[in-house]
Amino acid sequence: MTAATQLKAGDPAPDFTLPDADGNPVSLQDFRGRRVIVYFYPAAMTPGCTTQACDFRDSLTELNGAGVAVLGVSPDPVDKLAEFREKESLTFPLLSDVDKRVLNAYGAYGEKNNYGKLVMGVIRSTFVVDQDGKIEQAQYNVKATGHVAKLRSELGV
């Protein structure tokens, strides 16, 4: 097992196109000209991921009002994302990265400590991508609880 190569502020954001919960392609390129939060989470419908997704949902009006879009990315298949979206009334795109290509490109998949054991998995991570497609913030190993409030404070939203 090896650690993922992590991105940092100023790096170009790796471009991607992934299917959303309805199977429609969504590209990072579609958000050029505005800031976008791209966050990576381990699994839909788990307690921490639900908390984090609902916090983004509850903050979406303020984030969008400040010109910031939100994209959630996990290795879940499209049908599970659709179920998660419906169950939690999520109003931002959830993207499916089953082959973990984008997770790897962002350094959000790799070795992590899970209850004292080193395992390979999704590293809960959040990136703020600026209007020009550059990483403005790269945050790894974020906590599900309180993360969105902290991020909003950092962004002045």
Image (spheres, rainbow, N blue to C red):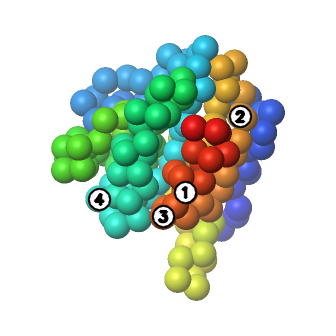
Is residue 67 among what the camera can see?
yes
Numbered disc 3: secondary structure: loop
From what the image shows, is residue 137 above or below residue 23?
below
Do the residues bearing badges 1 and 3 touch, measured as CB atoms within 8 Å? yes
- Amino acid marked by disc 3: Thr
Q: What is the CA distance from the residue labelled 1 to the residue labelled 3?
A: 6 Å
Secondary structure beneath dot 1 equals helix
Q: Nearer the viewer, residue 108 or 2?
A: 108
Residue at the spot of label 2: 135
Q: Could you tell me residue 132's position as x and y percent?
A: 69, 18
Q: Please tell me how crowded label 2 is: few (under 14), some (14-19), or many (20+) other residues with Cα within 10 Å.
A: many
On screen, residue 147 versus residue 58, left or right, reads: right
Q: Residues within 10 Å of mark 3 (few under 14, many from 20)?
A: some
Cα separation, mark 2 vs mark 1, equals 18 Å
User: For the residue labelled by badge 4, is the local secondary structure a helix, a strand or a loop?
Assistant: loop
Q: CA distance from mark 2 to mark 3?
A: 23 Å
Q: Nearer the viewer, residue 111 or 89?
A: 89
According to the image, label 4 marks what residue? 45
Where residue 133 sits: x, y (%)?
67, 23
State the residue position of label 1: 147
Residue pointed to by mark 3: 145
The amino acid on which the numbered mark 2 sits, given as a three-letter code, is: Ile
